[in-house]
Image (cartoon, rainbow, N blue to C red):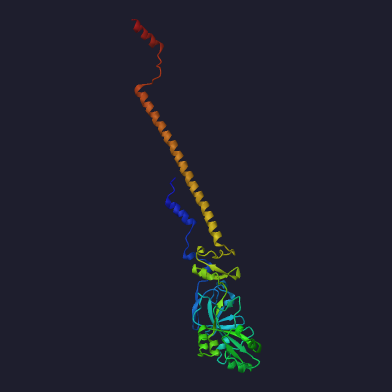
């Protein structure tokens, strides 16, 4: 038997605890890797919560954030309205998306408030803080003489009633205005707000610039997940929840590993690591126990062989001494020899 070498021990540990390689990346992470989406002037990677028809699994995004490309125009459905995704990119760092009401792209369209106003509703979207809004006072029962109110001619023509806008919030309006008019809030971009208040842009032009919305899904966990090198997605077992997909689950405590092929089992990282360490420890302990037993057996055999060889050597030395000097035991004589010796002494 040969002693346990450090090299053999290293090989054993390497087999028990294999290193992560690119070929071992988690299935969820590979499936949801960022892909470039191009539509008209828009060109950006599509990450959670958004999804497009690019062949990736549905859990890479959220069903409420689907972006389509219609006539070179990226579009998204928010509530009952269709919006055009404005700009060239999505602000993932701040979770902001700039959108324009599709109805405003008609040159003759006037921003007529709908029943649900213009404000996006939770749980998918909300307005960022701070947001820039104007207040529409429309369908008024009679004209209102207030210097803070600016007329909206196109809206007056459509509704056949006085219509106004103001930068005041609805709560800041006088009770008289709230009583005589329907009040709605129209969000706009910060740049448009500045130009509107500086009389450099009309209310219709400001509305056509669009506004920003803040998406709410995954707002708490996605930034830490991406910061740890993971990708956000929907939990394949519960699409209403977000999940973090990682190449190395030690990067983030909530990483979700794809189940083995043909199974539908979720394996949290702590369980996987615990089982691996436990099994590896047992195998290593058995391996070291066997090595120790073999060493002990080898040393016992050597001891027996040593004493046997020593005994043989002593026996051979005794035989040589006796051959040279004879034995020390009393010598036995025959009667005839004794009688002969006595006759010699008597003579």
Q: Position of residue 331 (x, y in %)?
A: 39, 16
Front-most of residues 297 and 83:
83
The part of the image, by quadrant, that contains residue 125 is: bottom right
Q: Position of residue 344 (x, y in %)?
A: 34, 7
Name the quadrant of the N terminus. top left
Image side of residue 125 versus residue 346, left or right: right
Q: Position of residue 184 (x, y in %)?
A: 61, 85
Front-most of residues 74 and 159:
159
The answer to whether one can see residue 305 in this image is yes
Q: How many marks?
A: 0
Front-most of residues 195 and 22:
195
Front-most of residues 35 and 183:
183
Question: Residue drawn 38% across and 8% down?
Answer: 339
> Where is 203 relative to 324, above or below?
below
Q: Position of residue 94 (x, y in %)?
A: 51, 75
Question: Residue drawn 49% across and 56% down?
Answer: 16
Question: Residue drawn 54% across and 57% down?
Answer: 274
> Where is 107 relative to 291, above or below?
below
Question: Residue drawn 46% across and 39% down?
Answer: 300
Which residue of the protein is positioned furthest toward the top in this rendering?
A: 347
Name the quadrant of the C terminus. top left
The answer to whether one can see residue 30 in this image is no
């Amino acid at each position: 038997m040969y002693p346990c070498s450090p090299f053999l021990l290293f090989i054993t540990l390497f087999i028990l605890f294999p290193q992560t390689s690119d070929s071992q990346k988690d299935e969820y992470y590979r499936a949801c890797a960022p892909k470039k989406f191009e539509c008209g002037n828009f060109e950006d990677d599509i990450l959670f919560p958004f999804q497009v028809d690019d062949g990736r699994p549905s859990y890479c995004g959220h069903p409420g954030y689907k972006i389509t490309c219609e006539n070179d125009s990226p579009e998204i459905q928010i509530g009952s309205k269709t919006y055009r995704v404005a700009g060239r990119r999505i602000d993932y760092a701040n979770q902001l998306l700039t959108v324009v009401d599709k109805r405003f792209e008609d040159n003759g369209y006037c921003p007529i408030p709908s029943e649900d106003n213009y404000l996006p509703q939770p749980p998918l979207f909300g307005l960022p803080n701070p947001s820039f809004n104007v207040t529409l006072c429309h369908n008024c029962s009679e004209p209102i003489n207030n210097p803070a109110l600016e007329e909206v001619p196109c809206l007056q023509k459509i509704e056949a009633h006085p219509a106004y806008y103001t930068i005041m919030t609805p709560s800041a309006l006088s009770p008289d205005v709230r009583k005589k008019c329907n009040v709605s809030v129209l969000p706009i971009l910060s740049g448009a707000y500045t130009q509107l208040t500086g009389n450099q842009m009309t209310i219709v032009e400001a509305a056509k610039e669009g506004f920003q919305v803040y998406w709410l899904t995954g707002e708490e966990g996605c930034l830490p997940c991406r910061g740890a090198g993971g990708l956000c997605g929907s939990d394949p077992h519960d699409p209403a929840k977000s999940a973090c997909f990682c190449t190395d689950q030690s990067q983030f405590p909530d990483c979700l590993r794809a189940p083995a092929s043909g199974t539908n089992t979720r394996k949290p990282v702590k369980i996987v690591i615990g089982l691996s360490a436990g099994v590896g420890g047992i195998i290593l302990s058995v391996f070291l126990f066997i090595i120790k037993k073999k060493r002990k057996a080898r040393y016992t055999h050597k001891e027996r062989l040593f004493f046997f060889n020593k005994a043989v050597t002593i026996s051979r030395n005794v035989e040589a001494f006796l051959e040279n000097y004879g034995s020390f035991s009393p010598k036995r004589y025959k009667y005839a020899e004794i009688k002969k010796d006595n006759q010699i002494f008597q003579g």
